[in-house]
Image (cartoon, rainbow, N blue to C red):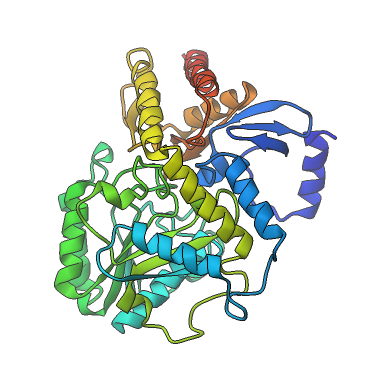
Amino acid sequence: MKNSEIAVRKNEAISRGVGMTTQVYAAKAENAEVWDVEGRRYIDFAGGIAVLNTGHRHPKVIEAVKKQLDCFTHTCHQVMPYENYVALAERLNKLVPIAGPKKTIFATTGAEAVENAVKIARCATGRSAVIAFTGAFHGRTFMGMALTGKVVPYKVGFGQMMGDVFHVPFPIELHGISVEESLDVLDKLFKADVDPKRVAAIILEPVQGEGGFYEVPRALMKAVRQICDEHGILLIADEVQTGFARTGKLFGMENYDVQPDLMTMAKSLAGGFPLSAVTGRAELMDAPGPGGLGGTYAGNPLAIAASHAVLDVIEEEKLCDRANQLGGRLKQRLEALRADIPQISDIRGPGFMVAVEFGQAGSTKPDADLTNAIRLKALEKGLILLTCGVYGNVIRFLSPITIQDEVFNEALDIVEASIREVVGEKK
C-alpha cells in the first residue's frame, strides 16, 4: 500500500473541506515517532495538534484504556453513571487555578467545551454577548467559528455567524499592536456597540494557538480581569491547547497572577482519546438546570480512564519541568540561527509551546511562502511540522513532551538544516 494510492481514494471518498497538512498515512506510532504505510519513519513535531503531550501510546495510558475496555465502553453517563467520571472531575477541581469550590463537566471536543462554557456563562449571568480576540481559535462549530478571530479557512462560505459576538485586536508588539491599543478598542466597543452590562463573558487563550503562539501580555490579562470584575463579566480561559504541561505549568493560566471563572480543556487531557472538559466556580457551573448540559458520548469511559493515566504521567515524569527544559533547548538552537537567517522575525513561547516567526529579510512583513517551504523541506527529511498564524508565517513546535533526547536532537538538526537550505535556495 502506498501513500499516493490512499490519497486518490481519499479525494474520491472524503470532503475536501477536511484539510490535510500532509499526504503521509500513519500505520503505527510510538512516543514521538510515526511510521507511514510505506514503512518510512517520521519524527512527530505536531503531536496531533497538541493532543499528545504524553506521546503516542504511552504505556500507562494504553494499560488504563485496556483495563477499562475489559469492563465496559459506554453507558452514557447521563443514563448510567460511572465512578471514574466523578473521580476525574474531583481531580480537575483540585488542579485548576481557580479559587474556591469548583465543579466540572465533560464533553468530547474542544469546540464542545467552548460551546458549553458560553452556555454556562450566559445562563449564570442572564446576559448574551461574548467578547473574543482577533487571531483566536475556539472551534469549528457555529459559536466556535463566531468566536474564532480568523476568517480563512474557518468562516469562509458558512454564512452568517452567531450574533452578539465581538472581537478586540490581540496585542502583538511585533506587528505594532500594543496592550493600550487593544484596551482602547475594548473601551470604544463598550461605548459604541455593546453595553458591558450585556456581556456574559470575555474568552481568551493564555497563548494563542492557531493565532501564532502569541502569549497574552501580563498587563492585558490583569486589565481584562479588572474589567470583568468591574462589569460582572465572566473570564473564560480557553486552555484547550495550552493545558497539561505544554507551557511549563499544568495550565497556561498558572503563568499569571490572575484567575479565570471558567476554563475549557481538551486535546492532551486524554492522551489521544476524545475528551474535553469545562471546570469553573461551582455556583456558575450549577446555573444550568439538569439536562441542560451533557452529550451522548460526553465523558466516554475509555477517554476518562486515559485521562487519569495522563495526569499520573505528567506528575510522575515531571513533564512540566521537562517542557521547560526542552523549550529552552529549542529556543537556544533557534536563537543561534538568527545571525545567519535574517528572515527570523521572532522566537517565542512559554515552556515547550515554542514558535518561530518568519518575515521578509530585514522586515517583519510575514513570509508565508518561506514558512511553508521550510515545513515541506522538513517533511522531506522525516520531520512533521505545523504552521500557524493569521498570515501562515509561523512554525509551531508541538512534539510530545516525553520525546527521547536522541530523537529530540535529531529533530533539531532537521529543523536547522531545513531552515538553512530553504533560505539558501531563495537567495
Q: Residue 194 occupies which quadrant of the picture?
A: bottom left
Q: Give left or right: position of 296 versus 125.
A: right
| Quarter the N terminus occupies | top right
The answer to whether residue 362 shows anywhere in this view is yes
- Residue at (27% x, 75% y) in the render: 199
- Residue at (54% x, 38% y) in the render: 46
Q: Nearer the viewer, residue 23 or 384?
A: 384
Q: Position of residue 231 (x, y in %)?
A: 17, 74
Q: Is residue 160 above or below residue 312?
A: below
- Residue at (54% x, 65% y) in the render: 84
Q: Is residue 197 above or below residue 299?
A: below
Q: Position of residue 73 (x, y in %)?
A: 69, 65
Q: Nearer the viewer, residue 296 or 142?
A: 296
Q: Is residue 216 above or below residue 74?
A: above
Seen as rendered, the residue at the extreme right is 1
Seen as rendered, the residue at the extreme bottom is 289
Q: Give left or right: position of 398 versus 217.
A: right
Q: Nearer the viewer, residue 67 or 26?
A: 67
Q: Position of residue 266 (x, y in %)?
A: 49, 56
Q: Position of residue 413 (x, y in %)?
A: 50, 16
Q: Is residue 83 above or below residue 125?
A: above
- Residue at (58% x, 44% y) in the render: 60
Q: Residue 237 occupies which quadrant of the picture?
A: bottom left
The answer to whether residue 144 shows anywhere in this view is no
Total residue callouts = 0
Q: Give left or right: position of 331 versus 109.
A: left
